[in-house]
Image: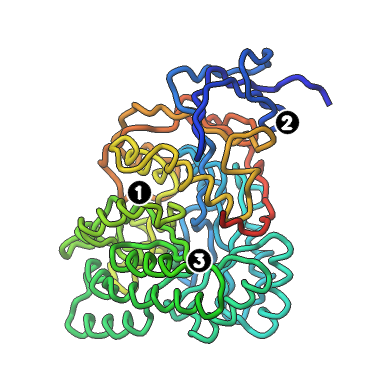
Amino acid sequence: MSNELDFVIRHADVVTASDRFSCDIGIRDGRVAMLGHDLPRAPRELDASGLLVLPGGVDGHCHLDQPMPEGMRMADDFLSGTRSAVCGGTTTVIPFAAQHKGQSLQAAVDDYHARATGKAVIDYGFHLIVSDPSPHVLADELPRLIANGYTSFKVYMTYDDLKLNDREMLDVLSVARAHGALVMVHAENSDCIGWLTERLLGDGHVAPHFHAHARPAVVEREATHRAIAFAELVDVPILIVHVSGADAIEQIRWGQTRGLPILAETCPQYLYLTAADLGGGEYEGAKCVCSPPPRDPENQKAVWKALRQGVFSIVSSDHAPFSYDDPLGKKPGGNEVAFNHIPNGIPGLETRLPLLFNGVNEGRLSLHQFVELTALRPAKLYGLYPRKGTIAVGADADIVVWDPQRRVKIANASLHHAVDYTPYEGIEVTGWPRHCMSRGELLVEDGRFVGAEAGRGQFIAAGRPCLD
Ligand code: DUC
Ligand code: ZN
Ligand code: ZN
């Protein structure tokens, strides 16, 4: 193997979760080979003077081409989704291989690999969604899959086709404990949602904004508390996903203060959207229907504060791409339907990092926290570190060169996903990725996607979660 470098990034102001230093970055065979001054010349070079050089983002929670019930389809597959991700500074995604009730987990994983192969332009891992923890799944499939690089799985406390009852949750948690996996929990109380939904519909309240009335904070709070109690009982770490506001945060803080290994994730929608974005009756509010729903400005403040204070380990997009004007999306069958039939989820892969980076510019969190929440911790928790999540000799050259001063008014027309809207239309942010590299290959140059071979992205088998 030659010692020549393939690529050098000159005058880099490198920021990781813990350090900041100036150097040149030498890249060989897709990995960082040298950090130093006056590195030898390489066939390709980039001058990063005046810019910030950060590890590529790791989006630890997104949905791409996930098989859906009849009549629904996600707008992004692995090609459009990963293209959009890299344009927003994300170089690794971790979507979900979802088991349907009655299906083997292995079959779900095989099907999902077929969807990703030949399409992804950046690297990816898989979480599992366990919806049917049969004795065979618990005793055979899950342990085997964990050993083979699927070390995190999501469980749902709501949605009829996905939810686990309390006993099933305990079973899954106990397999995670025995085999060293991490369970991600969607914490909302299913019966409360069902009961409220029935009453709202009975009173003729069908508009999108009633989605938030059917899923108030108490519903999330109760389930969050219950999940924490289960983690205590089984003595295993859990990660509560997409935390929306103060009530759930209070429960998480309570668990953490008791010394329990309770981790938490939030998403840009809880920092930038409120229930007002669900509208006052108009159907366009469907564009912001996600679960849990966005809350109010006080809750937004609570989420920012908890981010700053370290309550959250990660910020993910929860990209769940359903187009608005689409009979397989937000208008099922081409109709404006009652709130409980609107597909849950909003797009956000490409805007996740700029929206959070804007918080750095506004003084809401530090640059190191930004890197920690969006790259280092997701890489560690989901077993991809030290290949991903930092800039260090030996790590993959997944590198984003940020222009910290660039002002951008977010517009769907400029994004690269296949969704026909963004919930963040018109929001102005400061800071945007200028160049983005995956394993040493520049995929975004001067803010433009310069093309990549579909399928160049590699599946990365995950190691065990690292909670340090
Ligand atoms: N939960 C998710 O994690 N994503 C989309 C919808 C949902 O309820
Ligand atoms: Zn969820
Ligand atoms: Zn999700």
What amino acid is labelled 1 in the image? Arg
- Residue 380 percent across, percent down from the top left: 58, 51
Q: Which residue is mark 3?
A: 261
In the rendered structure, the answer to whether residue 156 lies left or right of residue 292 reads: right
Query: What residue is shown with label 2?
Result: 29
Quadrant of the rendering where the C terminus is positioned: bottom right
Which residue is at the front of the view, 59 or 79?
Answer: 59
Q: Residue at x 44, y 32 (%)?
A: 433
Residue 345 image-quadrant placement: bottom left
Q: Is residue 450 above or below residue 169?
A: above
Look at the picture and state if 65 lies above or below 141. Answer: above
- Residue drawn at point x = 51 percent, y = 75 percent: 231
In which image quadrant can residue 192 be found? bottom left
Residue 59 image position (x, y, % from top left): 50, 50
Q: Residues within 10 Å of mark 2 (few under 14, many from 20)?
A: some
How far is mark 1 from mark 2, CA to CA?
37 Å
